[in-house]
Amino acid sequence: MSSKRKVGIIGGGPGGLSMGRMLVELGHEVTIFEALGEVGGKSFTFYHGENVVEMGTCYATFSHKITNQWMKDLGMPMSPLGDQRFDGDDFMKFVKSGYGPALPFQVLTYWKEKLRLERQLARPNPPQSAIEEAATPIQTWLRERNLGKIENFMLRSTTNIAYGFIDEVPTVQALRWNDMKLILTGLFKQLKMPVEGWAEFWRRVAARLDVRLNSRVTGVERGNDGVTITTDGGQTQKFDTVVCAIPLDEFIKMTESTALEREIAAAVEWNGYTTTLVAAEDWFDDVHVEAFREAVVPGAERGQMLSARRDGYEAELGGPLYLAGQLTGDYTAPELEELLRADITKHGGTVTNVILQKRWKYFAQYSPEAIRSGLLSDLESIQGQNRTWYTGAIFSHEAVSHIVNFNAELVQRMQKVL
């Protein structure tokens, strides 16, 4: 940016806060509007006694280069994820059981093919063949290349983390998340979590910024001379530009939306993810995470328990604590709780207390038809239109690492044109 600008950011989750920090470091005046009474969005941490349980964002990988450095700057130590078991066996043993050549060869093939496609898609005018490939379900793409071990890996890295079933998720989105840093993090068992919790991390980031909590934006008026943001209560404030760090389908309800904004919002389908903290007796305590193949293979019914993570002990809450995940589907909260209780019983545990359930609007999955019709180009061209910049899951990925890395590039792009 050629001079100091006033920037309004809508949303105090990882997208809005990381964007705010980067802009402030460049010397700009930033105000962040957060509708809730706390920052962090899906980086929601449950605290009780000495227990720190991540209900949303959890692991950091090698891809979290920026936030990992911020953790160090803020004096926040990280702890490694413990052993994982998939379908009753060691996770890496399950990965290696997949069809095709040896795992090192598959990793190399995957890396080369991923780079090839992403380079084609990065061209000003990508070939239609690359766009068609990007729209293909990732399972089909992997099978065409005999990458069965990578396919097994993605059952855990993609579906188990609620990024969709691999026979549905477009290749472009699966490749975006499953980069080489993620794969190497998993292979070398280097997944880590902040000891004090993601919520505390984002609170510390927010402490250095002008964040307006409990400030729900009700109107965004964009004109040639700037952007006026109105919050509930009728307060208004004017900015040079605005950053949308909330889902686009929510943003277009508060402004006079453009045709392109509406097209992009309609081109994605938000999935649902539910995490539930329970206390359970007589369940696993020899590994950190148990994942269940029956819930993540293509065609599995939503609502099943994808995995469970042992997260401490609290007698006051009912004993050993576990965090379980489910794809929400069309189920109500009580129905999901009932399904979860049944699954835990089936897998040998006895639920003594359901402590907290969080239902998330999660993973904006691109329509294959929209990809073929130019969605990827639209996501690029819309940036900066009407004094508006866009970040978050639709434009990068649901993962904190990708959102923050995306913002680092977006800030540089903003700097050139404002």
Image (cartoon, rainbow, N blue to C red):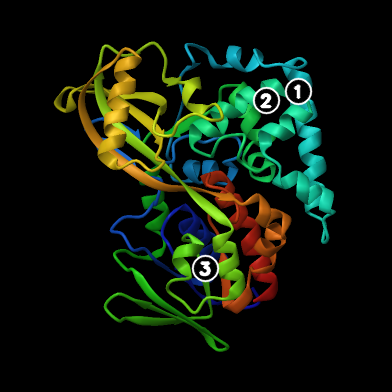
Query: Residue at 42% of width from left, 39% of height from top?
Result: 76
* Percent x, y of residue 81: 46, 24
Is there CB contact under 8 Å for labels 1 and 2? yes
Is there CB contact under 8 Å for labels 3 and 2? no
Per the image, the residue denoted by label 3 is 243
Q: What kind of residue is marked 1?
A: Gln
Q: Residues within 10 Å of mark 1 (few under 14, many from 20)?
A: some
Query: Residue at 73% of width from left, 34% of height from top?
Result: 141
Query: Residue at 52% of width from left, 52% of height from top?
Result: 269
Query: On the image, which quarter does residue 274 sit in?
Result: top left
- Distance of mark 1 from mark 2, alpha carbons? 7 Å
Along the viewing direction, whichever of 343 and 101 lies nearer the viewer: 343
Q: What kind of residue is marked 3?
A: Val
Per the image, the residue denoted by label 2 is 150
Question: Which tag, 3 or 2, sits closer to the chain's start?
Answer: 2
Q: What kind of residue is marked 2?
A: Ile
Horizontal side of residue 240 vs 283, given as left or right: right
- Numbered disc 3: secondary structure: strand
- Numbered disc 2: secondary structure: helix
Question: Which tag, 1 or 2, sits closer to the chain's start?
Answer: 1
- Residue 109 can be seen in this image: yes
Per the image, the residue denoted by label 1 is 106
* Percent x, y of residue 399: 53, 44
Give the number of the mark in front: 3 or 2. Answer: 2
- Residue 55 can be seen in this image: no
